[in-house]
Image (tube, rainbow, N blue to C red):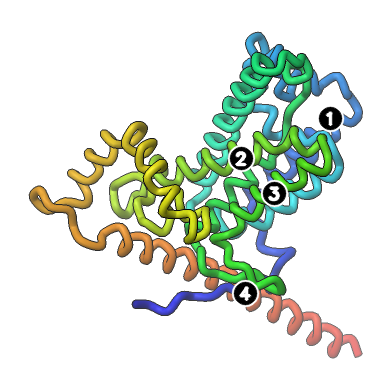
């Protein structure tokens, strides 16, 4: 059993952002400024369920439209911070693919939810309320951190990253009881969390192992719940698992996790352990490089000051 690697969160907090994340941050800020100076653009870029059929591109653009200053600040900071942790491990191409898939399918899920709520309640505000925001993808980033560095503790509050998605969902539901405005964010956060888990669990391609997804027990659906509830969650989750992914699992097991007709014992846990070690090691190397760069900059500044004196 290898000793888990820890990562220092405080070092280089506002440095080391990737070029891709900076570009996406410009898109978020630019789209917010666009709807600020041209409010009518919301009708064409945000997700309005009653108009989605003619304006189908809303399923893609809505995720990059932040309608409030608070929303664009939180989304931009979260993108830059989480992106510099995840992109070096996944790679730029996979990082872009994750954002696109989670954003698009989250919008589809929110669209279906709004239509269903309209037919249940007959309230037209579900059809004409502009829905948008990057918080679905941000929720997906939390699921990514849960997968890669689940046992890493956050500074000050001492909470492990594997509980971040669950805590975010719980807080989002709780806030909805205090303000009705928060209910417009809840479907996006719930959908973003679940779809990102499906993507990482079943769809994400692993070039080093030539199979898809993360079949480890530590990343099972029940891992989002406390230990007390898992015996009740596992049977329900297994039903949907067999319905949606049974055939795919049989194919993957036959190609990657079998020897003759018997599965390799412990293959799921071994692969998960290796992935977490690679992720933690990559993060540690990146933060070490940032610390070295900061030290060099400080040394050069000190030498320049001495020469001038």
**For residue 286, what is the image quadrant?**
bottom right
Q: Which of labels 1 and 4 is toward the front?
A: 4
For mark 2, what is the residue?
190
Q: Secondary structure at mark 4?
A: loop
For mark 1, what is the residue?
34
The disc label shown at residue 174, or none: none
Marks 3 and 1, how far apart at CA: 18 Å
Q: For this rendering, which residue is in front, 216 or 300? A: 216
**For residue 133, what is the image quadrant?**
top right
Q: Is residue 69 above or below residue 44?
A: below
Taking 264 as reference, is 229 left or right? right
Label 2 vs 3, first from the N-terminus: 3
The disc label shown at residue 22, or none: 3
For mark 4, what is the residue?
8
Q: Secondary structure at mark 2?
A: helix
Q: Which of labels 1 and 2 is toward the front?
A: 2
Q: Which of labels 3 and 1 is toward the front?
A: 1
Label 4 vs 2, first from the N-terminus: 4
* Crowd tier of the residue under label 4, counting other residues whose Cα lies within 10 Å: few below 14, some 14–19, many 20 or above: some
Image position, residue 238 (x, y; %): 36, 42
Q: Which of labels 2 and 3 is toward the front?
A: 2
């Amino acid at each position: 059993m290898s000793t888990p690697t820890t990562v220092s969160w405080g070092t280089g907090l506002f440095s080391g952002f990737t070029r891709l994340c900076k570009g996406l941050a410009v898109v978020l800020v630019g789209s917010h400024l666009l709807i600020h100076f041209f409010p009518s653009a919301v009708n064409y870029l945000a997700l309005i369920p009653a108009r989605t059929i003619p304006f189908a591109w809303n399923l893609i653009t809505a995720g990059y439209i932040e309608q409030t200053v608070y929303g664009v600040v939180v989304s931009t900071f979260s993108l830059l911070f989480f992106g510099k942790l995840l992109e070096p491990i996944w790679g730029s191409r996979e990082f872009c693919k994750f954002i696109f898939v989670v954003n698009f399918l989250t919008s589809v899920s929110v669209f279906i939810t709004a239509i269903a709520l309209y037919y249940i309640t007959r309230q037209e505000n579900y059809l004409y309320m502009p829905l948008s925001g990057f918080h679905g993808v941000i929720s997906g980033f939390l699921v990514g951190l849960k997968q890669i560095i689940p046992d890493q503790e956050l500074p000050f509050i001492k909470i492990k990253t594997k509980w971040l998605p669950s805590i975010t969902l719980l807080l989002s539901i709780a806030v909805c009881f205090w303000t009705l405005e928060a209910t417009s964010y809840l479907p996006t956060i719930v959908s973003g969390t679940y779809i990102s888990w499906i993507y990482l669990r079943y769809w994400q391609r692993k070039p080093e192992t030539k199979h898809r997804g993360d079949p480890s027990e530590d990343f099972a659906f029940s891992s989002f719940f406390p230990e007390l509830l898992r015996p009740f969650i596992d049977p329900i989750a297994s039903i949907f698992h067999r319905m949606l992914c049974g055939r795919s699992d049989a194919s993957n097991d036959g190609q990657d996790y079998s020897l003759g007709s018997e599965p390799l014992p412990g293959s799921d846990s071994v692969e998960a352990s290796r992935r977490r070690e690679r992720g933690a090691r990559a993060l540690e190397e990146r933060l070490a490089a940032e610390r070295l760069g900061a030290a060099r900059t400080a040394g050069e500044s000190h030498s320049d000051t001495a020469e001038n004196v």
